[in-house]
Image (cartoon, helix red, strand yellow):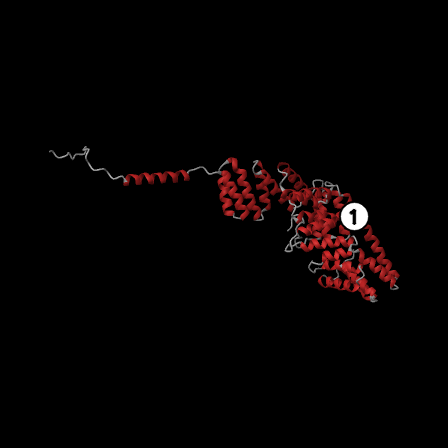
Amino acid sequence: MEPAPQGPNSDNRPPKPLGGYLRWVFLLSIAAAIAALWFRPINLSERFQTGLEAVKRADWQTARLCAADLMKDEEHHAHAFLLTGYEQRARRRSKDAYVTFSKARSHPETRELAFHEAASILYEVGEYSQVILMCQKVLQWNAERTDTRRLLAAAYYDIGAMIQAINALRVVIEQQPNDHRPHYMQASILHDFERFGDAALAYEQAAKRITKASTVRDEVLAGWGACLVRLRRHKEALEVLKPAASWPDIETQRAVALFELRQPDAALKAAETALRQQPLHPDATTVAARCYELAGDVEKGIALLQESAAQHPLELELHLRLADMLSANAQPERGLEHRKTAAKISDYRRDFSHKQQALVHNDNDATLRFEIAELAEKLGKIEIARSWLRAAAGMTTATEEIRSYWQQFQERHPPGPKASTNPGQAD
């Protein structure tokens, strides 16, 4: 038999190993998959959401990378501007942030956030009329946006438009029923407008919702106690103030309530505690002087009142008490001087109260707010005057006279340390 042919075309050659071939096929498949992932178009919607999450974490490197990717697509420029604006604002570049947020208003997916952030920046600089208009626009797009409605309420609060502010807060309360802040802000507004009964109810609701660890808990209790004292509900006031820390306003309200409940020894103890914490506190001084008078030490009471009146010359109660005690101490002429001063202060207070009441439904009269600020300054209530002047100057109806007076006021009374946050925005 002939041997089997062994040439290159032989059908009887041994099978060629497949391992190397399959390895190459596998490697090529992996490379193709990697290439497909590498060159796959970026999902810009996902990139934007990633950027927003990075903003919440203050992860600005990731936010910048996302903004850079979004900027490559013309349809997503507004998204990129929004992320950039957040970083600028976080770095206290408010003017730059405002301009950048303005550029983010052009897209339906970003305009709501951009308008809200721009309005927040305007609120910080006192442009209240613009804040109100911008918040109203946002709420037309999204009526469920609670942070914008709170900002709207705060702007109304700061211009003294009581009804509009409370109406906005009612919606916030419906949307966030367990949050103490809208109740606290509502109480503060009502308190400012001397609606003490309604204010007490609002403070009570805030107190029910606030935690013991809250930084404003004692402020809520102090306001509630003050309203109850004004309503002559002194026993209730003492119960409300019982868990509060010892600080001047708290101790003063305790002293007033205790004195009215005919407990002069306890009242004096509370008043003297307040005076150690804040020397010559006007209301604490008045209670202490009345206690000294009851104990037969009229001269000590008069001396304390005179010292406090020298430091607080526009406090009505100090002059009224001095007038009474000096007259009873055979010094009628000196008593008459303080009575005349008290009458002048009382006139200012009456005008101030009447003008405030005129603002209940008013959200557009800068001149009326300017007049209230002038009266507050005459009464020595500098921070109240500052608040009303700032409100007047931040309205579209503000005149050059108002803006000029505002600048002069700031020169006369440079602001001290930044005041506490608005009750509607605070802890």
The residue located at (28%, 41%) in the rendering is: 19
Q: Quadrant of residue 135?
A: top right
**Other residues around mark 1 within 10 Å, as few (<14) / some (14–19) / many (≥20):** some
Q: Is residue 223 left or right of residue 46?
A: right
Which residue has dot 1 on it? 353
Above or below — where is 362 with respect to 277? above
Q: Quadrant of residue 37?
A: top left
Depth check: give the residue in front, 417 or 274: 274
Residue 322 placement (x, y as % from top left): 83, 60
Residue 84 placement (x, y as % from top left): 54, 43
The residue located at (58%, 44%) in the rendering is: 97
Q: Quadrant of the N terminus?
A: top left
Q: Is residue 244 left or right of residue 7?
A: right
Above or below — where is 351 with respect to 302? above
Depth check: give the residue in front, 376 or 148: 148
Depth check: give the residue in front, 42 or 344: 42
Q: Quadrant of residue 235?
A: bottom right
Residue 111 placement (x, y as % from top left): 58, 38
Q: How many marks?
A: 1
Q: Amino acid at mark 1?
A: Ser
Is residue 320 visible to us here? Answer: yes
Residue 77 placement (x, y as % from top left): 53, 38
Is residue 127 visible to us here? Answer: no
Circle 1 sits in a helix, a strand or a loop, which is it? helix
The residue located at (87%, 58%) in the rendering is: 336
Q: Is residue 182 left or right of residue 50?
A: right
Q: Is residue 384 left or right of residue 297?
A: left
Looking at the image, the residue that sits furthest to the front is: 1
